[in-house]
Amino acid sequence: MTEFPSTGEGTSEQGTAKGGESNPVGYLSGAPQAIIAKLTDSRFQKQVIWTIASIILALLVSAVIMTMAGYDAGRAFAYLLVGALREPGRVLQFATPLILTGLAVALAFKCGLFNIGAEGQLYIGSMAAAVVGFTISWPYLAHPILCLFVAAICGGIYGLIPGLLLAYRGAHEVVTTMMLSYAAIALTTWLVGPNGFWMDTAGSELIPQTPLLQDTAILPTIGGPYLHWGIFVAILAVFVVDYLINRTVLGYEMRAVGLNRDAAEYAGINSKKNVALTLTFSGALAGLAGGGEIMGTYNRFIHRWSPGLGWDGITVAVLGGNNPWGVLGGAIFFAALRVGGNAMQMDAHVPIEMVSVIQGLIVLFVAAPRAIMWMQNRGVEYVEWVKSEEKLPLDHLFGIISSLVGVFISFGLVSASTGNLLLSVSLLLVGVVAIAAFAIFLAKRRYILPIFTILSIAWLLTALVSFFTGILLVTVIAGVMGLLSITDLLLLRRRYQDRNIVKEAES
């Protein structure tokens, strides 16, 4: 039976206080004791040690790659470090949106949800802040607050959509949040385009953008041209999310749903409400990140202004262990890599893409033990379940194998679709859905039929796109995979229908 977090009083790791939500003043006054308790916790120490080891391993592997490519790894790392240390304001400026998008992803993870749509929610929030910033005239202090508030509200509403789809229609959040991200980017592009409502007609027609924000809406800078007051908003959000997760009844319910949704419902917790609220709060944090960047860095909304801050929030959350304070440290570290990477490129002549390689290796080494442990545990449970079945579940086994094979095929075919954006996006979508299908099959979750239906449709759509673009190899492979997926889907549907008939007969 799944054990839920304690509801007694104590440190922030022990959940809510007895009788309701704890006092925020008490939370702040008890912070030193909570920090000491956290630092002396053996699990936290192991996590920190493994994170540091993952960074060291990533740097070592990166050094090998740079040496094989003919670059001086020692000189590159020296400039990477010096470049980050000599521009602390630039580091904190880059870290500001990463803190908020990392918190958005981490908060969803706490409820057992995978919000990969922070990029779209960030775009919606940034557009909302820009519109309020250049259309409304408010006093200096009130105007930025209003812009940030509207950005958070709009981002939250955009996060609520996949939350409601998951809670009440069973639509998987991985698919809905990702597709809504592309929809948000396309929508905002249209809004500032030639036929959009908010294109800057007085500026350059070559750059789709809104008019400049009014001076009253711009966030003031701190100690230089880069860092702005958005950093305080991000740090405040760390406190708020930590308090929400660890010291409120709602946070306790979110964590309970994340640990075991069925057990939480049995205990009287409304899982649908918590799923919808979690994705709403997650979207609000991402929207806040977008609003802060527009108001503090760009001073207007510009077509495709984000370099992938929403996607980077996933890596920040993984590095931070989905802990708000870990997210803060992870965001600063990744921001330092980015600033130092610019110096590494200019002075050591190492391509800036090496920073992305380092980030990817860090996430790989951090997440690998958890993924291996999860697959090991689920694999043992799955083998025991197969043995317990009267007949060998060939349809189930075929679903696992085809999902895993689909992951490698889809990502492998991306290289064959170079220059075709629509086909590349379609193949990436198939790969992500196939990963989700493999995990759901292995965990024997109740979303098997919906996710496999989506996978079948994604394969067929990919075959259709590749057919019209004239890539015969991709058309044949995607078509065959789509037909095999549909066949297995029909077998799976028959299995679950037969089980329902048996249950009705026994009742």
Image (cartoon, rainbow, N blue to C red):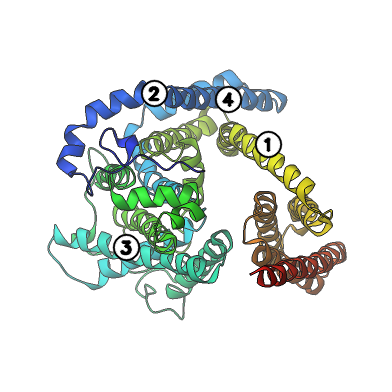
Q: From the top left corner, tell me how far across and down residue 128 is, in percent.
A: 33, 67
* SS for callout 2: loop
Considering every residue shown, the one lying at the far top of the view is 74
Q: Amino acid at mark 2?
A: Asp
State which tag comes first along the sequence, 4 or 3.
Answer: 4
Q: Which residue is painted at 33% across and 36% down in the image?
A: 14
Which numbered mark, 4 or 2, is in the foreground of this view?
Answer: 2
Which numbered mark, 2 or 3, is in the foreground of this view?
Answer: 2
Q: From the top left corner, tell me how far across and down residue 21 is, in percent.
A: 23, 48
Label 1 environment density (alpha carbons within 10 Å; few <14, some 14–19, many ≥20)? few
Q: From the top left corner, tell me how far across and down residue 236 is, in percent.
A: 25, 44
State which tag comes first along the sequence, 4 or 1.
Answer: 4
The answer to whether one can see residue 71 in this image is no
State which tag comes first along the sequence, 1 or 2.
Answer: 2
Q: Which residue is mark 1?
A: 376
Find the distance from the CA under tag 2 to the CA under tag 3: 38 Å
Query: Is mark 4 in CB contact (under 8 Å) with mark 3?
Result: no
Specify whether 379 is left or right of 58: right
Q: Amino acid at mark 1?
A: Gln
- In this view, 398 is above or below 61: below
Which numbered mark, 3 or 1, is in the foreground of this view?
Answer: 1
Q: Which residue is mark 2?
A: 41
Q: From the top left corner, tell me how far across and down residue 112 is, in percent.
A: 49, 50
Q: Amino acid at mark 3?
A: Ala
Q: Quadrant of residue 456?
A: bottom right
Specify whether 333 is left or right of 376: left
Q: Which residue is mark 4?
A: 59
In this rendered view, identify the residue nearer to me: 330 or 82: 330
Which numbered mark, 4 or 1, is in the foreground of this view?
Answer: 1
State which tag comes first along the sequence, 2 or 3.
Answer: 2
